Each structure stands twice: as structure tokens, then as C-alpha cells.
Image (spheres, rainbow, N blue to C red):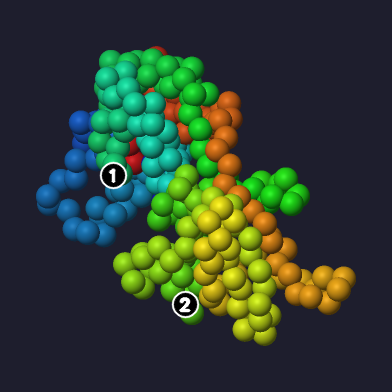
Amino acid sequence: MGITASVSCNCYKEGKTTPCPFGDEFIYNASQMPALETPFNIDEDEAQERYRKFRVWLTTCCEHPDMNDTLAFIASWKGHQAFIEAVEALNDPKSFSLLLSHLPDGDDGVTSPELAQKMLDEIALFEARQSTLSHAVLMDTERGDVVSMGSQVLNGVLTMDRQTGYDIGFNAEGFFIRDRWEMNRVLFIAKRVEQRMLLPEHQQVEYVDLETGRSFVCNTPFGKWYNGEDGVPRMYLQHFHIEDRPAESGRFAYVTDPLRRVLQASVRTGNPVRWH
């Protein structure tokens, strides 16, 4: 699930398609989506057969399947939300008014070629400024490895324990344990954490805030445990911390690249972007 966008080709308007089998009933709707205006005096079976033939024609009538000059998957809803949050973090709503207000929050709508050009300008500005952004990552303190780049689910949730209802994750405020069954009450949060295995047979661990000494004991470990050389059970992720890092170049290319492609197609063809 997510956002898909398309731009119609101009082949039909330029007489480059094969003849439509139902030419008198062929129409473009407001978004220039090819469709048939079905007569009222035909039964359902005939209507379905006409639509089947029409769909076959659409896939083969020109060099563009379904008469789409460009068709692209833009992003999942989670990825889209992460991009919008990054744009908002630049704290310049006037410069990014179209990206903030015109990208769809549903699965329909159109964008005119004129607005498409302005959105292209905003994307270029965003890419020039995104290096000023930063984001939280979860680091393995002992090994220096990145454990996670974060999650867009429920403000940072990485995993949920279905037996206890505890959500485990992190955000810019710290590594957290929240009780989903008690209105997401925060049970533990810290920037630097030690995780101690207490009772392996019960999956019981203790989380310690290394900056304040505060601790929290539960039966929801984060990661796996092993027996050390001394026979003492330990968590693989025993020490970890939250680190603020500058955004990588091209971090949001998964959105901006396909978005740029459909917006450019709109400007080139003079046809609107259709959001699906």
C-alpha cells in the first residue's frame, strides 16, 4: 500500500493509436484517464465483455501500455510520511508549500503541469538542504555497529511483545519500552542503555539507564542472549545507545526519484499527474 502516480501519453490526441473498438464512447475523464461511457440499454454481461475488449485495446493501442506515458510507485505510506516529516523539519513551509500541501494523503487527485514544475523546484531545493537534517540511529556501543536506522511505525517502534503488550523501539528522545495496553505509557527510556540477562528460562532482563542509574525489569528482551565463556548468560546487545547523525546524501531518493520522474513527464506532455 502506498502512493502510485501516472501521466497519460498523447498518442490518442495525436492519432497514433490503433482505432478504439468503441470509439464513439471513448472518453477522457477530468484526470485524462481513458474510460468508456457505457450505454444504459445493455445488460451486465455485455457491459463486462465490452470492458474486457476495451482493456485489451488499452494495453496494445500504442507504445505506452494503458496509455501511460509514465507510471511510478512513489512510496509506501510509511516512506511518504518519513519524507514529509523531513520536509517539515527544514522549518520553511513557504519554500515547500506544494510538497507539504499537494502531495496526496489519499489515493486520488490530480496535479496540473504548472504545479508539477513548481514541485520539481521544491524537490531540488529539498535535496540541496537535506544535508542539514539529522536523525537518530541505534548503535551497538561495544561493536560500533548500527543496530537500526529507525522506524516510522508508532513513533519508532521496532518490535512488540504480544504476551506483555510492550513495544520496544527508539526515537530522538531515546530507547524506550512502552505499554501499548496502557495507552502507550512509557515504562523506560534512556539514551545509553545496558541490558542484563537475569533469568534466561523466563526471558527476564534488566534495562539500566547508564546516565541516571534507573532500571526496569521485564520479560521482554531486545535481541538474543548467549552463554559467555564463564557460563554467565549475556545479551548479545548488552550496551547500546542513541546517536544523532546527519542525513545521508540521497536518503530520500526512494521518494524524490520516482516523484521527479512523473512530475517531469507531466511538464513534458502537458498532462496532469494522476495520483492512485
Query: Mark 1 — residue?
Result: 106
Q: Can I make out residue 132 in this image?
A: yes
Q: Nearer the viewer, residue 73 or 238?
A: 238
Q: Residue at x 36, y 64 (%)?
A: 184
Verify CB contact (< 8 Å) between mark 2 and mark 1: no
Residue 227 drawn at (x, y percent): 80, 74
Q: Quadrant of the C terminus?
A: top left
Q: Quadrant of residue 31?
A: top left
Q: Whole-Å distance between the Cαs marked 2 and 1? A: 34 Å
Q: Nearer the viewer, residue 35 or 252?
A: 252
Q: Looking at the image, which residue sits at the far bottom?
A: 201
Residue 139 drawn at (x, y percent): 64, 48
Q: Nearer the viewer, residue 8 or 56?
A: 8
Q: Residue at x 48, y 29 (%)?
A: 133
Q: Nearer the viewer, mark 2 or mark 1?
A: 2
Badge 1 amino acid: Gly
Q: Can I make out residue 12 in this image?
A: no
Q: Looking at the image, which residue sits at the far front?
A: 212
Query: Mark 2 — residue?
Result: 164
> Does residue 129 appear left or right of residue 93 in this picture?
right
Q: Nearer the viewer, residue 102 or 37?
A: 102
Residue 222, relative to residue 259: is it above or below?
Answer: below
Residue 234 drawn at (x, y percent): 73, 70
Badge 2 amino acid: Thr
* Nearer-N-terminus badge (2/1): 1
